[in-house]
Image: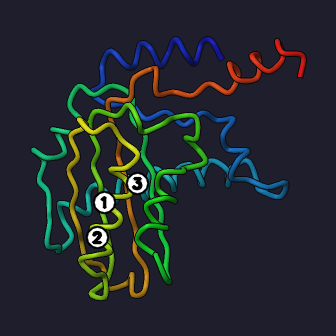
Amino acid sequence: MRIAELGLEELQKYVDTLIVIPNQNLFRIANEKTTFADAFKLADNVLHIGIRGVTDLMIMPGLINLDFADIGTVMSEMGKAMIGTGEAGGENRAINAAEAAMSNPLLDNVSMKGAQGILINITGSGDMTLFEVDAAANRVREEVDENANIIFGATFDQAMEGKVRVSILATGIDSSAIRDDRVETSSVSQLGL
């Protein structure tokens, strides 16, 4: 584990933004029958969908599209990052999708609260409403620092009929925003619980 941490520290020196998915978090999305290869495919899929959410803002038709400058604003020299995507249908689908995007089980020890930059992509079909886009964006805003640089876009994908997808890229996450379950456990142990 220490070698991996040293490797990440070294890598951090050479990249603008770094998203880390600890291998032990694969247990949170797998079950007893999940093969070793399939577990890593699940992690790859989370990254693929999240990154696609960012690139869709530049290439998919939409009312609010972004360009490389917008992406650069959120990602340039921002350090640690988290990525999440949620999809939902039915009543409150936009808010439910936003909440799912913020609770990525592979990254659950990272909080968006300290993020300096947030990129939000809200995707839906022609049935997506203005109020849904606003509700999803506001739900994410509630979770981050009021001074965070938030850039959002909305794209259309007719294959999303009846559903809304929210993708979030949160950057500039400092060490105080990383929750360490080991600290909480040791505090409880000291109390004799």
* Above/below status of 77 relative to 21: above
**Where is residue 21 shown, x and y percent of the image?**
54, 37
Q: Residues within 10 Å of mark 3 (few under 14, many from 20)?
A: many
Name the element at disc 1. Answer: helix
**Where is residue 115 shown, x and y percent of the image?**
34, 34
Instruction: Kindly report the distance in space between the C-alpha atoms of the residues bearing marks 1 and 3.
Output: 16 Å
| Residue 193 in the figure: left or right of residue 141 | right
Residue position marked by numbered label 3 in the rendering: 50
Residue position marked by numbered label 2 in the rendering: 133
Question: On residue 150, which mark appears?
Answer: none
Query: Is there CB contact under 8 Å for labels 1 and 2?
Result: yes
Q: Residue at x 67, y 50 (%)?
A: 39
Instruction: Kindly report the distance in space between the C-alpha atoms of the residues bearing marks 1 and 2.
Output: 6 Å
Instruction: Kindly report the distance in space between the C-alpha atoms of the residues bearing marks 2 and 3.
Output: 18 Å
Name the element at disc 2. Answer: helix
Residue position marked by numbered label 1 in the rendering: 137
Q: Residue at x 60, y 54 (%)?
A: 42
Q: Residue at x 35, y 46 (%)?
A: 169
For residue 9, which quarter of the picture? top left
| Residue 170 in the figure: left or right of residue 4 | left
Q: Quadrant of the N terminus?
A: top right
Amino acid type at mark 2: Val
Query: Is there CB contact under 8 Å for labels 2 and 3?
Result: no
Q: Earlier in the sequence, mark 2 or mark 3?
A: 3
Amino acid type at mark 3: Gly
